[in-house]
Image: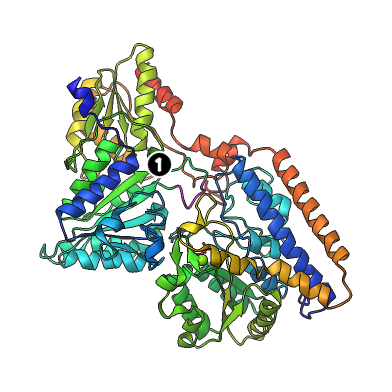
Amino acid sequence: MVATHTDLNTDTLLWMYETMVVIRRFEEQARREADAGKLRGMHSSIGQEAVPTGICAHLRVDDYVLGTHRSHHHCIAKGVDMSEMMAELLGKATGTNKGKGGTMHIADIDKGMLGANGVVGSNIPVATGVALSAKIRGSDQVTAVFFGDGASSQGSLHESMNLASIWKLPVLFVCENNRYAEATPFEYAVAGGSVSNRAPGYDMPGVVVDGQSVLDVFEVAREAVRRARAGEGPTLIEAQTYRYQGHFGADDPLGYRTQEEEDYYEARDCIANLRAHIVGSGDTSEADLDAIDRKALSAVEAAAKFANDSPFPEDDELTTDVYVAYP
Amino acid sequence: MVQAQSVRQLSFIQAVNEALRQEMERDESVFIMGEDIAGGAGRPDKEDAWGGPMRLTKGLIAQFGPERVRDTPISEAGFMGAGVGAAATGMRPVVDLMYVGFLGVCADQILNNAAKIHYMFGGKVKIPLTIMTGIGAGTNSAAQHSETLYSVFTHFPGLKCVVPSSPYTAKGLFASAIRDDDPVIIFNNRQLMGMRFDDDVPEEPYTVPIGKATIAREGTDITLIGIGYTTRVCLQAADDLAAEGYSPEVIDLLSLSPMDNAAILESVRKTRKIVIVDEDYPRCSIATDISALVAEEAFDYLDAPPKRVTPPHTSVPYSRSLEALYVPDRAKVVAAAKEALE
Ligand SMILES: Cc1ncc(C[n+]2csc(CCOP(=O)(O)OP(=O)(O)O)c2C)c(N)n1
Ligand SMILES: [Mg+2]
């Protein structure tokens, strides 16, 4: 198998555009479902679409991604079925996790999505183990684990970076630095004002990238994935990005950040950016992109319909899946 | 009339907030640490953006400042351990562990250090640490954010564990915990935070003793044991049972370690039947502990085997349809009680 989109050709550009638009429409729909009371809430990834999109462009179906509490965008970029995701959000039997996991735990092993995770920092060691497994099995599979700026303060990251480095594991540590952990500003919580500068201490490359530019993320990921696949070891990527909405939905982000800051990031929106780039560079027209937009919207509408029409799990599902076997 | 005027109703959240404020006023060595207990850290104009995820600590930073109301990075092992160290050396830290499921991140500090230092050091060092943490299912939050887990902590010698069931007991237990010289963990069920209560919460500081249960409703036919939120469930079930002509007694356990064995035994020797209602996992739990206590110490008085109403041995499901089956509710308690009664 070859990587899906190694070269930055029109095909790749359009895949990235469509992926980001689909993520945004999905999140908007999910928010509507939450507002209608069908789920308690969710961590929206709107604003951060470019990060997993630029990374996952380089990943194969059999590569792995692990995420966080805010992971709808990781799942979509890795190819998880949107209808099953939406059904999971609504706790339906047809969901990716049969309704047992919900918004913070979406997983689809067949697509290489080894799960979102509600405990901050918890997935980073797991990802390290997934990469270890690939190495032991002699496979060239690559693992990317996403985490937030807040998670960078967990010991789990530091222990994992050290392990991955001494064992030269094929893993990408991808920090989505959206400047806040809940209501805590990054500059308060992270000593030295940088996540990427943790890397030299663990003897691996640490790269800062503009997370609002999917093209920049794509370039950085190309090298990190190449390095991992070649057995040269891990990379830490700090993608500077921004979540447009509140932490979980109900909170008002202006309680802890400013309108000017929000305006600054929204003016550098990743989707608008890429759209301008594509149109400016030639063979794709605004109308072509509009068609992609419409396609994305109807795919999300279909997902919502599927989810809403699906049944809740049978009662006996409460006690299944606790064990593989428990005689 | 006079009495009606003096009744002051607070929410659970307000009661906790008041206890923290009063204990900090009372004792300069008390300080609080946790994630977003103020919010907007380092930005004076944005200070107290949250006041805690459940607003339990709202307004405290304005009164006591960021030295004593300390927002932390997401580093539970680090700041829980820092709480242990500060407690060992003259401070009375209150550490907020947002959800009890995050125990896993800082278990070493709680279980190996907070619990054991006093014993291992021959009683020469005290750890007057208070940990407050959120528990409970019923909020559509899935397996990692809905646990109860207090039974795990009661397993460990050296830790005290309390579970408030109302604003009144919350305020008094917080005061007791903070003044106590041992590590005390306060388990706050999230469902209580949205409920209305009509009990009177005195404005002046008071304590509810650690290690004592209270009788939430007196009766003679059957004992229902409630813990925190399940005390509310027991009281509802008691209404239903009373409507059917029974006289149920509800014990509000409040303290799991130490546990008020005497109160449980006294009640069950009177009623001769017991239903224990516990939201924690059913294996090796406080409910099994109580069941064993009653079987060992009151066997001859029992008219029916002790009954436990708990979730099944499974993680907490996300789907609301399944979660509704998971949490002990009024109907399940009534059904269990009637089995014992009939
Ligand atoms: C171990 C742990 N501590 C605390 C929390 C509560 N919590 C959920 S998300 C979050 C903030 C995470 O910030 P960051 O890592 O920057 O990710 P972001 O939300 O910005 O995507 C916190 C504190 C948690 N889920 N797990
Ligand atoms: Mg963040």
For disc 1, the chain is B
Percent of width and height locating residue A130: 58, 71
Q: Is residue A257 above or below residue B258?
A: below
Percent of width and height locating residue B121: 14, 67
| Total numbered labels placed on residues in the image | 1
Percent of width and height locating residue B252: 27, 33
Q: Is residue A63 visible?
A: yes
Q: Residue furthest top?
A: B245
Q: Is residue B143 above or below residue B3?
A: below
Q: Which residues are magenta?
A: B141-146
Left or right: A281 with respect to B161?
Answer: right
Secondary structure type for disc 1: loop
Q: Is residue A322 above or below residue B124?
A: above
Instruction: Verify whether residue B144 appears in magenta.
Output: yes
Left or right: B133 with respect to A201?
Answer: left
Depth order, front residue of A327/B63: B63
Depth order, front residue of A19/A88: A19
Depth order, front residue of B77/B72: B72
| Residue at screen point 41% across, 52% down | B53
Residue labelled with disc 1: B282
| Residue at screen point 40% across, 67% down | B43
Amino acid, disc 1: Pro
Quadrant of the image containing the N terminus of chain B: top left
| Residue at screen point 30% across, 58% down | B61
Left or right: A7 with respect to B43?
Answer: right
